[in-house]
Amino acid sequence: MDIKVFGHEFFYDITSMSMLFFPGEKVNFVNRSSNETHIISRLENKNNALKSITKIRFNGKWYLSQKTAGLDCDKKNLVKQTFYKACSKATGITSQWGILTGIRPMSVYERHRKAKDDLKSIMKTEYFLSDEKVSLLSDISAIQHNIINADAADVSVYVSIPFCPGKCSYCSFISVSAVNADALLQKYIEYLCKEIYSKSELIRRYGLNVKSLYIGGGTPGILNENQISTLMRILDSCFDLGAVEEVSFELGRPETITQKKLELLKAFNVDRICINVQTTNDDILSQINRNHTSDDYFNAVETAEKYGFKSINTDLIAGLPHETVDSFCRSVDDVINTGVNNITVHTLAIKRASALRDCRDNYNPKNFDVVKMLDYAYNKIRAENYVPYYIYRQKNCISNGENIGFCKPDSICKYNVYMMEDVHSVIACGSGASSKIIKNGRVSRVINVKYPIEYVKEYDKIVKNTETINRMLKADFCDE
Ligand SMILES: C[S@@+](CC[C@H](N)C(=O)[O-])C[C@H]1O[C@@H](n2cnc3c(N)ncnc32)[C@H](O)[C@@H]1O
Ligand code: SF4
């Protein structure tokens, strides 16, 4: 796909929008095009007004969209609006998310809510959102209000366990197979405890208040009982887990779960655990390289329910290869029937770094099966009294779908909201972990080395990151 741009530099936004209309096609920004299908995007300043014009040549015909607005308008939106309209006219493709690509929908919604704009009208006319998506954002916003209470001294803590029992075909998260990696995993835990301790010293030094703590992966359930005990002991001595409002442990794959591990987590005041299945279709579980069955999942949830955790979450993915609408709907029903009070519905995103990267057939904006799967899931889950409480979108999601966390009343995962909406700083430990220091709405990131092997061999880089965070917090919390 060749695109010629004049008068603006919104290359990233235009690339994300083209993926919507021309999935899988590589975008080339060119001065002149020899391709039959190409787009011209122009922004011009004329007579004290801005005019955006998009022309697209498609299947031998030209399609045009243009719009003029005042000089103080949002230029990026103006360019995206005519781009969307011209491409939509040419291809017949529309998106329920309109021009909201590559952006967190809640942050746009909240910005307009705080400005006291007419939300329904602005989301539809400026961003082209469907009524359904506006009402979804409105529901999520109402729920998030109850827990968002920004205090400069609040932080959350994230602990990364980037190890898995194997690699699922759709996944691009950086994680190491734990098979034959006992020594590395053991060493990783040792260094991780050091980092947790030094980061907790900063939290104490600056009088910060730990609102939530999340141990995520990868698959933290891969840790053996001794390693869980070591990790939870250091976390408890550093943060007093009983006093932290919410502690989550993403066990992950059901085959890693034992009664002893659940007992330990309960004893250390863990509130929320995740036992994920993605689909309850056993053939698909095996094809996507998850070496567990749906029965392993049902048994793990049944066992975990006896321990009285405040929340149990299960992740599902709509759109896995060979999944039919019927089999996905059955998965939704199966998960609801277990009684878990949190369900997170993901839409398959085709990740370049995953084994499914060449699965272009699935990556189709007109994949109406996925639309039907999501419709069924959202309606059924809501009918069972779960409410949507957080949302995020990823690139290359089939059918331009989204990921939504649902919970029963009083079982919201606060960490997910704090982290997704940048409510307060997150101090992150472990390889691949990214700390976010937030001051007056500005986010600065401090990113740890990616892989566990680098983490244990080059721990001095982690020490430097801790020093960087110390300097940032000192500037924010010490009046000198
Ligand atoms: C960081 S993963 C950790 C989950 C845990 N290791 C497990 O597999 O149970 C969190 C979730 O992201 C979702 N996920 C991962 N890759 C995805 C993709 N390519 N598209 C959609 N969802 C994806 C899955 O639902 C997964 O459970
Ligand atoms: S989905 Fe979970 S278990 Fe599978 S590779 Fe990704 S992080 Fe690991």
Image: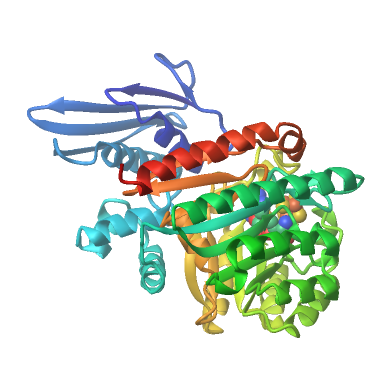
Instruction: Name, please, the residue furthest toward the left.
Output: 47
Instruction: Name, please, the residue furthest toward the front.
Output: 480
Q: How is the image coloured?
A: rainbow
Judged left or right of residue 167, residue 416 is left
Residue 37 lies, with reference to residue 394, above or below; the image says above
| Quarter of the rendering containing residue 374 | bottom right
Instruction: Name, please, the residue furthest toward the right.
Output: 180
Count how many numbered circles sit on residues in the image: 0
Q: Which is more toward the observer, 236 or 426?
A: 236
Q: Which is more toward the observer, 178 or 296?
A: 178
* Quarter holding ligand 1: bottom right
Judged left or right of residue 352, residue 169 is right
Residue under the image location 27 percent in, 51 percent down: 126
Q: Is residue 376 visible?
A: no
Q: Is residue 469 visible?
A: yes
**Residue 205, position in %: x, y?**
48, 52
Residue under the image location 47 percent in, 56 percent down: 420
**Residue 330, position in %: x, y?**
71, 75
Residue under the image location 55 percent in, 61 percent down: 371
